[in-house]
Image (cartoon, rainbow, N blue to C red):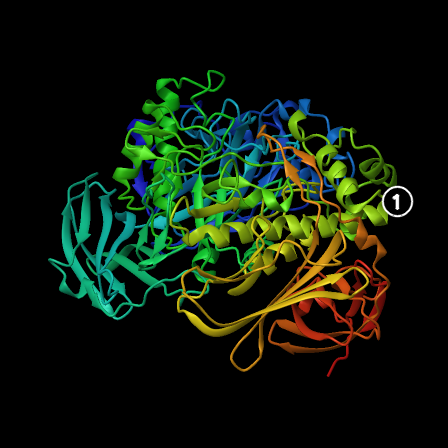
Amino acid sequence: MSLSSALTRRGGAVLVAGIMVAAAAVGGMPERARAAAPAVPAVAATTVTDANGSTTALKGFAIQSSAKVTDSPQAISSPGYQPDSWHAAGARSTVYAALVADGTYPDPFYSENMKTVPTDQFEVPWWYRSDFTVNDTSARTYLDVTGVVSAADVYVNGKQIATQDQIAGMYTAHELDITAHVRQGLNTVAFRIKPNDPKKDFTSGWIDWNPAPPDNNMGMVYDITVRRAGPVVLSDTHVLTSVDMPSLGSAQLTVKATARNDSDSTVTSTVTGTIGDLTFGKDITLAPGESKPVVFTPADTPQLTIANPRIWWPAGMGEQALYELRLTSRTDGTVTDTAHKSFGIRDVQAPLNEDGARSYSINGHPLLIRGANDSTDLLWRWNAQEVSARFAYALNMGINAIRLEGHLEPDEYYEMADKTGMLLLPGWECCNKWQDRDKEFGPYTAHEHEINRASMAAVAARLRNNPSVISFLIGSDKAPTESSASDYKEALNAADWTLPVVSDINRESVLDYQSGMKMTGPYEWVPPVYWYFKKDGGAEGFNSETSAGASIPTMDTLRRMMTPGELETMWTDSSAVLYHRSPGTSFATLKDFNTALSARYGKVTGLDDYVRKAQLAQYEAVRAQFEAYGRNFTDAENPSTGQIYFLLNSPWTSLHWQLFDRYSDQGGAYFGAQKANEDVHIQYSYDDRSVVVVNRRTAQTQELTAHVDLYNTDGTQRHHQDATGLTVPGDGGKTVALTIPENIPDLDTTYLAKLTLTDSAGKEVSRNVYWLSTKPDVLGSYNWPNTPTTSYGSLDGLNQLAQAQVSATATSASTGDTTKVTVKLTNTGTGNTPALLTDVHLVDPQNKPLLPVTWSDNQVSLWPGESTTITATIRTADLNGATPNLRISGWNTPTSNTTVATP
């Protein structure tokens, strides 16, 4: 049976129905006797729920290399087989992840531990084996399979039911009808999983982000589930929504599904549905083996026209309203199957503007995409709390969109995005099998085209009703060929995909799909002024992946990830190839970053000084990137329309491309982004010295006053300006408040600029402090991966800042599962010296950071006598019953600790 001939759709997934591959029959007993107690930690049998319409995920697997197993597939897949000396693996686990979890290999994120793991053991198939129990065998039983990396032969109770030619591709999804093989009581399923090669298989890889794990993520990354149903099965359930624009006063819903009769008799089924208080239904008659569409439209079901619908909005723009569709099929009054789908009502548009840039709007409001590229864990380990923290961090920084390049997370990820209001831009990956434009990966064979189509169909069906998803990128660095694009178009059309489809991220097009994005980087260090120029990666159009390269973690994290010798090399030898930098030669060293750091901030004197200067450099670089795109969003010519910061997080312990690190610690990059993306924000323009106020709220804000003060590094004030009566349009609008004169008398080469914005009552709305130089950074000509700097600005005057004392008082209060710590910081100095970039870390009694934690603000700068109050929110459970402390440090603030007062 070919893959395409077996394809059907089921509840948002592509299915392979009724595969019965002939295999030698073997009795229920294993080939050889085994000890009563397995050597592997017990993987309990999964108890399958009997009810029709129920779905039960397998709890986990026993796994072992096929090179170490001499028993036949029939024996391995039979109940009672004892997997001696096998390894325990979770329900979603790659091979290497399981071997790390059981202690076979040490922490892959420290030093070069991962590099020492032998890879030849992953060049042969591995067995994944799981038991499940079924009480009632009168219902039909299906095995739903997806997330296999890269392909698998499948056996149930000693019988082969699918081959690796059929279960191929990480994102394809398959329904295997195992009714004839299931017995009452204990049952066994076994997968012989083929080794993964992202250059040859439709899976995922890591390219130059970080080293690939030694098994290339071979294994299972999604749940394998057992599903029960009666004779009539529901599949392909989804909702099409249309909302009246611009009023948003009415919405039209179309409900679609497919009903299939898997019995040997003609049946009439009643299919009923509910959406909140709405109810609807119809009867459908099906011959044996017949499938029919079940469709409810506003024309035949008037209640599907909804007045005053609850609209789904991105975070910060309104409510994240979700609806729930539930369908039920009944035959002779008995439930045979159920299906449900969560969805939102919203309008997404993303046309190309006059300059060819993709420009998004949501529910009629223009939206600058302030995005970042998210990355799953290096070993594809799902951790709901960790992912929830990633979303919380992104929203805390003002990030409103996440791009997923080929690392498409499990369903819970998209549900979290729906509930939190995070926009998503999923798509395929570059530089491996998905990129068929390169001879290394294509052209595809006929069978590979089948996998390609099946992958797109499965993903489209999974994502089409998530309101957080606003596009799909069918290409990454390069647009696909026309033949692959045809695969995608066929699958997307069949799935009723209505959202924008982006051809690639690099200005190409294919068929009727266009890009509207640029992929010019940079990927290495550039000075802040770079972002303001409307060329290369600067703030015009939609920049699909970009950042100023290196991102040095905090000292706490560095000591968790590298040996003392490796840390010494990092700052003393800029030409050294660093394992935690990148496996590719283009980004293997820290030369560009280290050169700029010393040239601008002065010679590095040690590891502490290096990390201290790195945080300051990363703060200004990231802040400028987001600020430039924010300022240029509403320009009449060549406006900026979006950017994707590369990367949001790191899948492992990295020295580059991250706004926060593997352990969720935050440094200058994080807080620079948070500052730049304030709702109402005052900012300095590095190119023309203008001071601009940007308003990201939907409504305009008015009666604002901008204040600018310039200081020498000894704290002496050299300039003051005000601009009053400012009105700023909403939806990302801006107002130029004033322009700072070019020549300020007696201003040092290195100086500080304090910008504050107050409302009509004098309350501070935004505050922003810059460290600047009268000597400019000068750029050369663009040369991928960045534009070189030919002359550096001089910020080494910051080394002359006198020490500043900052005191802190803090109290905590717990509500439910969270604890909020309120911190008041005060510069207690009596002179003129400001405390620059004062950092607050919440730490345990052993002085280790308590993470994850979200701060309302951090790395603040205070002049003598000034105070500010900031808050930190943390899961109460992460405190482990201890009273937290505050660790205060900064550019010119000595490190001190303060105990948090508790009620």
Q: Is residue 239 left or right of residue 151?
A: left
Measured from the top left, where is residue 519 in percent x and y? 49, 35
Question: Helix, strand, or loop for circle 1?
Answer: loop
Q: Residue at x 69, y 74 (%)?
A: 868
Quarter assignment of residue 87:
top right
Measured from the top left, where is residue 635 in percent x and y? 41, 51
Q: Is residue 30 left or right of residue 21?
A: right
In this view, 827 is above or below 484: below
The residue that label 1 is drawn on is 605
Measured from the top left, where is residue 755 in percent x and y? 62, 65
The answer to whether residue 899 shows anywhere in this view is: yes
User: Which residue sits furthest left?
Assistant: 300
Quarter of the picture holding the C terminus: bottom right
In this view, 568 is above or below 319: above
Q: Residue at x 72, y 36 (%)?
A: 580
Nearest the viewer among 123 and 400 is: 400
